[in-house]
């Protein structure tokens, strides 16, 4: 008799070990499905709701009022009067500054910054005693808040010899011309 009880007890435990996890699994899946596929209750619709919905977009796209433009007009006026003397800019107010003069790999990079002019032609002169000078030209380019020479990328092989070269940039505009202070660059061929 003990044999039949133990077989029956083993069988019961096996059934419990299989059915209980399956029931838990199905219950979990049913809960997940009901949460993911929840349907809104038909008893309250947005049209029937007593609560106020917040306004989504509060941006006013109407034309600006005159009072809104006062600060902008004052700033424009200051810009147009600050750079001029008696209605025309003097050539002394135009400056050219060499900001970068270096060799990168096989190219010599020269960068400039221009103040007081937004158009014209930049001329770069590289000189070394006893050597033929090297000259390049580029137009003035304007960015959002400044102007510069379009850039000088000169192949190192274009320099007659290696060594220290003196660099100077000049700017010619309809107002006149001006030159930068000189700087040096070490050229390796």
Image (tube, rainbow, N blue to C red):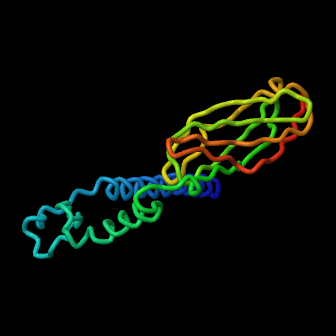
Closest to the observer, 67 or 42: 67
* Residue placed most toward the observer, 82 or 145: 82
Q: Position of residue 188 (x, y in %)?
A: 90, 32
Q: Position of residue 41 (x, y in %)?
A: 17, 63
Q: Is residue 116 left or right of residue 100?
A: left
Quadrant into which the N terminus falls: bottom right
Q: Quadrant of residue 167?
A: top right
Q: Residue furthest left?
A: 48
Q: How many marks?
A: 0
| Residue 88 placement: quadrant | bottom left
Q: Is residue 29 left or right of residue 175?
A: left
Camera-side residue of 93 and 140: 93
Q: Residue at x 92, y 35 (%)?
A: 163
Q: What residue sits 82% from the left and 33% below the top?
A: 105
Identify the image quadrant of the C terminus. Answer: top right
**Measuring 20% from the left and 60% from the top, which residue is drawn there?**
61
Residue, x 45% and y 60% (percent of image)?
84
Q: In the image, 82: left or right of 173? A: left
Q: Is residue 117 left or right of residue 96?
A: left
Query: In the image, residue 85 lies at what x, y percent?
Result: 46, 62
Residue 124 position by quadrant: top right
Q: Is residue 137 above or below residue 96?
A: above
| Residue farthest toward the bottom in the current orientation of the protein | 51
Give whichever of 169, 158 is nearer the camera: 169
- Relative to 173, say whether 95 is above or below: below
- Residue 176 location, x and y as percent? 56, 45
Q: Is residue 16 above or below residue 172?
A: below
């Amino acid at each position: 008799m003990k044999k039949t009880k133990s077989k029956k007890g083993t069988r019961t435990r096996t059934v419990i070990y299989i059915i209980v996890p399956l029931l838990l699994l199905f219950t979990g899946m049913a809960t997940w499905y009901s949460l993911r596929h929840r349907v809104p209750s038909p008893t309250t619709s947005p049209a029937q709701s007593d609560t106020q919905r917040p306004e989504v977009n509060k941006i006013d796209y109407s034309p600006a009022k005159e009072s809104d433009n006062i600060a902008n007009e004052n700033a424009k006026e200051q810009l147009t009067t600050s750079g001029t003397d008696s209605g025309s800019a003097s050539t002394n107010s135009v400056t050219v500054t060499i900001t970068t003069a270096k060799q990168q790999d096989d190219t010599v990079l020269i960068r400039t910054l221009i103040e007081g002019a937004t158009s014209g032609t930049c001329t770069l002169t590289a000189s070394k005693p006893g050597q033929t000078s090297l000259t390049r030209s580029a137009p003035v380019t304007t960015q959002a808040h400044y102007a510069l020479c379009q850039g000088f990328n000169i192949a190192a092989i274009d320099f007659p010899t290696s060594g220290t070269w003196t660099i100077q940039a000049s700017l010619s505009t309809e107002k006149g011309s001006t030159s930068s202070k000189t700087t040096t660059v070490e050229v390796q061929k």
